[in-house]
Amino acid sequence: MKCRPLALYITPGQRADIKGAVALAGSLPPVQYLLADKAYDANHFRGVLMNRKIEPVIPSTANRKTKIPHDETRYKHRNTVERMFGRIKDWRRIATRYDKNAENFFSAICLAALLCFWI
């Protein structure tokens, strides 16, 4: 695992991240598994992944009546996702959301990702 972003999408601060994940699901490369935390445990998102033949490795939320099992061994590798975000947030401009304009902020994220992972 190279710990690199595959696609980037910015959502308004008051919007749930899962809405961005659903929007990005169509741009995922052919993969077998998608690792995500409990915030992405929604039937509609799992359905999007299953339609693309991607197995969700997402633990169930505490309030889900019927727990959906997930591969705990695979889930331990989710820290690579957190490390990727951590490397991008090493850039103070991004960690503090210095840019208030969404286009400028997104450009800064793209530049940081380029410098962190491809140079």
Image (tube, helix red, strand yellow):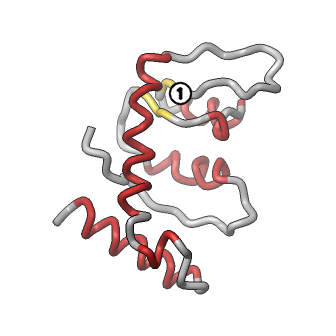
- Indicate the quadrant containing the C terminus: top left, top right, bottom left or bottom right: bottom left
Residue drawn 49% across the image and 24% down it: 55
Label 1 secondary element: strand
List x then y, in percent, for residue 35: 48, 33
Residue drawn 58% across the image and 80% down it: 102
Give the amino acid at mark 1: Pro
Q: Is residue 94 above or below residue 35?
A: below
List x then y, in percent, for residue 107: 42, 79
Is 107 left or right of 19, judged from the image as shown?
Answer: left
- How crowded is the residue under tag 1: few (<14 C-alpha within 10 Å), some, or many (20+)? many
Is 2 left or right of 37, judged from the image as shown?
Answer: left
Pick whichever, 95 or 10, lies toward us.
Answer: 95
Pick whichever, 102 or 47, lies toward us.
Answer: 102
List x then y, in percent, for residue 7: 41, 56
- Please name the residue that numbered disc 1 is placed on: 56
Residue drawn 55% across the image and 33% down it: 49
Q: Is residue 40 above or below residue 33?
A: below
Residue 16: quadrant of the picture: bottom right
Residue drawn 41% across the image and 78% down it: 108
